[in-house]
Amino acid sequence: MIRIRCLLLILSLLSPFAAVAQSNFDVFEASISEIQNALDQGEINSVQLVEQYLDRIQAYDKQGPKLNSIVRVNPQALAQAQALDGERVRTGSRGPLHGVPIVVKDNYNTDHMPTTGGSVALANFIPSENAAQVDKLLRAGAIILAKTNLHEYAYGITSIGSLVGQTRNPYDPRRVPGGSSGGTGAAVAASFAAAGFGSDTCGSIRIPSAFNNLIGLRPSKGLSSIYGILPLSHTQDVAGPLARSAQDLAIILDIVSGYDSRDEATQIMRTAAVPAFMDRLYSANLGDLRIGKLQQYFEGSDSAVGAAIEDALDWYEQQGVEIVNIEIPDLEDLIRRSGLIGHEFKPDIDQYLDTFSMDDSLNLNFIVSQGLYHEAVDGVLSRSNASELDEQAYSRALAVRSQLRAAIEAVMSEQGLNAIAYPTIKRTQVFTGDSQPGSNCSLSANSGLPALSMPVGFTSNGLPVGLELLGGFLQDAELLAIAQTYESAMSSRRAPSTTPALVSGLAPASQSFELVFSRGSLRVEARFEYSTVTNLFEFQVSKGQAGERAQGQEITAVTLVVDSNGDGELNEPIVLNLLPPDADAATGSHYMSSEFRLAVEEKRLYLKVFGVSLPSAGAVQLLE
């Protein structure tokens, strides 16, 4: 990354449009409209935008929280930015994405850099042409800044693969970011680009959106092209953006939606009205809406997830939306019999490689027989490779998909529903290495109907929660308008603490402080250091000096306690034990909760020492 950064910096210095002075505009959490306004006003140029995003990638992707979301930075990014800056001067802006950096999942074809699917098997595979949506982005003036990591071949929801490994969640880097578009989700949440692109076969846009406090739409099948995207199941596959706001999502969806002769599913867009996401973004009249609460998809939810969803639905109800409980008959059976990944993956990936690769020997059988994949996808790849297409079973599954869609549409019609609501995923983010349960992805994926995941808050330990809204076919813009009302009123976006704004192009430095506790013959010496970037609180604690060991043994425990209300009343529970009775010294680290981190920053954290000559409630001293 450092070598690429230096090369790009040299290129920028050669540009007549590169600014001499440092811009005061900061890309951290910046929206597309804010970026475009800054570009129009001359507050920043696209070269500087690229440099700022690269600085953030440098600081946080392989360092600090080590999100590991980026597979490759586009070596042409600064050259593209320079050209677009020049074009802006000469002929003006192409539109809202002119000169704006975007990241794309590394299963989107790019003809100037490899498209890997997260696999070592495709580490150097450069397809013969761009994905359709990539071409639309480039024509709109967007800069493809980098390719993002994914669950290998998009065949899972924790985002791990053989090429770059495990992507981590910026809200808790010990946990998964969702998948398969987890690299995009983490990168967009961390402000590595203005927005990003993913694909969704069963939840792969929506789950990373839910897990990273983003908004993402699985569009109606055929609304936009999947041509040139490495397939998992061409019938179920869709593709599109993940963003930090409804407006950003609308801007991009208007650009990438529409007919493509190379994708048969988009035939519907030859006669259907274009959704006009931006024009309809603020059109929702909540008092006229009915939303169905799908009871089956709440069962087994984590309490924190369920509580956040219920609070969001309560808000809608308070605004005049009628919330009605619904069930879809035979839903579990219809879902079970309508999945197509097992039928389509092998022939789809072989056809894709035959179309875009110059290597005739590259196919799924070669990849599996040579072990060119991560062990996390061993089972699904091996089973797919060993399978042969059963035409009758495949036809039955296709027929059940129609039955599922008809069942959903019947309930929506009978109940007069504008949308159906349920948790995007009903279990919180697991720790890396664990399997992720709780997905509700199949209702949309197996029916072809659109579904949008929107952020609706956080659990008590700071993990984002997403609410999913499913709508009628080609009612995508209506879903986004419904979500926008909540976003506008509730300010549901919160940046992750591990990827804060840079300071002079660098991550904020760790903070450290020392403390000496002394009460009569008792003495404790401590040194503390904390970092918002790693979210770790580290400590070194000892009982007095080496020669005072006998006195120090009178100390029975050294702990930390938070003054929760800031009122000096320290009868709160212990939050961390630093030193047990039989130890003279200790070192360690503690992963901070949001409450703990805030207590440190606001100086509400106290050392509480227990000893034979101290009060039974302990003696306290402020950490400062």
Image (cartoon, rainbow, N blue to C red):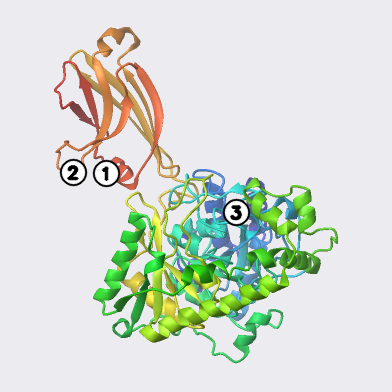
Q: Earlier in the sequence, mark 3 or mark 2?
A: 3
Q: For mark 2, what is the residue?
A: 566
> Does 379 sit left or right of 507 as displayed?
right
**CA–CA distance between discs 1 and 3?**
34 Å
Residue at 35% over, 27% down: 527
Q: Residue 100 location, x and y as percent?
A: 56, 68
Point out the frontmost of discs 2 and 1.
2
Closer to the camera in the image, 412 or 538: 412
Secondary structure at numbered mark 1: loop
Question: How far apart, in angstroms, are the residues tagged by discs 2 and 1?
Answer: 9 Å
Where is residue 267, by image quadrant? bottom right
- Label 1 sits on residue: 602
Q: Which mark is residue 70?
A: 3
Residue 270 location (% of width, % of height): 62, 89
Q: Give the position of the C terminus as an image quadrant.
A: top left
Nearest the eye: 228 or 3: 228
| Rendered residue at 33%/27% (across/down) | 578
Q: Secondary structure at mark 2?
A: loop
Crowd tier of the residue under label 2, counting other residues whose Cα lies within 10 Å: few below 14, some 14–19, many 20 or above: few
Q: Amino acid at mark 2?
A: Gly
Residue 64, position as x, y percentages in the image: 50, 43
Q: Looking at the image, which residue is at 75% across and 63% down?
A: 388
Residue type indicated by callout 1: Glu
Is any part of residue 38 visible from this angle?
A: no
Q: Residue furthest bottom?
A: 271
* Image height of 624 relative to 301, above or below: above
Q: Position of residue 468 (x, y in %)?
A: 43, 69
In contact (CB < 8 Å): disc 1 and disc 3: no
Would you call the spot at circle 1 few (<14 residues within 10 Å), some (14-19), or many (20 or more)? few
Q: Is residue 282 above or below residue 384?
A: below
Mark sitting earlier along the chain (2/1) = 2
